[in-house]
Amino acid sequence: MREFIEEILKEEYQNKFEYIFNNSPLLQYLDCKMGAVYGNSKTRRSLANIYAIYSILNFYVEDFYNQKEKYKSFTGYPYTKLFSFCRQLYGGEKLQNHALNSRVNGEFKNKENTNELIIIDSGKYALHINFLYVDEIDISKTAIKIIQKYIQLLMEKDNAFVKDLEELKTLKTINEKLDKLNTMLTEKSEARVFEIISYAILKNHYKGTKIYWGYSPQNLQQEFLTLYKTGRTNANDGGIDFVMKPLGRFFQVTEVMENYDKYLLDIDKVMRFPITFVIKTLKTKDIVKSELDNFIQIKSGGMEIIINRYKQAIEEIITINELKEWMSNLFDVEINAVINDIEMYYKLEMNLL
């Protein structure tokens, strides 16, 4: 249970707080989706999923709080009303509609809940009554307090990163800037901050590399490598975070987790097209490669056709170690370009541009 969630539950329910939490799949689901408030989060912000729930809770509390019998005949809130509410929330301006339409229910049911959390019927949405009560206690206001606290903590975290950016811009020497960038590039970096910083470093690392290509040796053209970011960090990009032109390399930003299932899923999502993994870890790339090879060996049951399928799809592994090394080798003007890119893409992420 997250510390801030525990504090809210203790305030609301005193010595019954653990009982309420342990008997509330809704509160447990919110808890598992709110890891982004901590620096070493293995998850992203999950705003779409959380806001889908929040939007329904918001109107439910106004209309049906503690009125179980009245709510049983309710047919749901219209999509436009809920989605409009989500778009007005912090970080909600660019949210897609997947969470309301299917994503929350898919995840919720995967956690051994037989009923769907969000009931969808003819374009209307309601929360299942079973998850709004623990015994006869309506927990909806508590869930709202938890979500509002989560938003507040994210805002505070974002403001801290903005301060880091402002400090970066005031530093005079390149060594000072490098030292500050290194403190921002750690295993505890938030997922989307790590993605933005790693993109800025890789973009400037590769851009000085020139290749020659063409349809015949007599007609070659020269071109510098260019790395493109495919969209926002929560975009539905199919497993591609960065794309390199003209080589057509795919880059996926990820983390070392309990196992490497997600890596194989990312490979499968792009039909086993070769991927370079950019990994938020201080483990060496050789250690990660060895662990990944062992996982593939176990997952495959030793079948060479499966082993080769995945091993051949891993083009390169890049860790924090390589990112820091490559950044230290950049020229002064390129370090300033890294800082400018971090600021620009962070502002795009936060809808500040």
Image: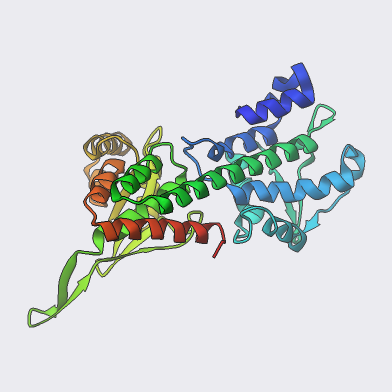
- On the image, which quarter does residue 214 sit in? bottom left
The residue located at (25%, 60%) in the rendering is 206
Q: Considering depth in this image, is 244 or 25 the residue closer to the camera?
A: 244
The residue located at (24%, 54%) in the rendering is 330
Q: Considering depth in this image, is 249 or 267 the residue closer to the camera?
A: 249
- Residue 61 image point, x, y percent: 84, 44
Task: Point out the residue furthest to the top here.
Answer: 15
- On the image, which quarter does residue 331 sit in? bottom left
Q: Considering depth in this image, is 19 or 167 the residue closer to the camera?
A: 167
From the viewer's perspective, is 332 left or right of 96?
Answer: left
From the viewer's perspective, is 184 left or right of 274?
Answer: right
How are the colours assigned in the image? rainbow
Query: Number of marks in the image?
Result: 0
The residue located at (27%, 52%) in the rendering is 313
Q: Quadrant of the C terminus?
A: bottom right
Q: Considering depth in this image, is 305 or 92 the residue closer to the camera?
A: 92
- Residue 50 image point, x, y percent: 65, 46
* Residue 224 visible (yes or no): yes
- Residue 292 image point, x, y percent: 29, 38
* Residue 271 visible (yes or no): no
Task: Point out the residue furthest to the front here.
Answer: 172
Q: Quadrant of the N terminus?
A: top right
The residue located at (42%, 56%) in the rendering is 342
From the viewer's perspective, is 101 left or right of 65?
Answer: left
- Residue 212 image point, x, y percent: 14, 73
Task: Point out the residue furthest to the left here.
Answer: 218
Position of 88 relative to 215 (above/below): above
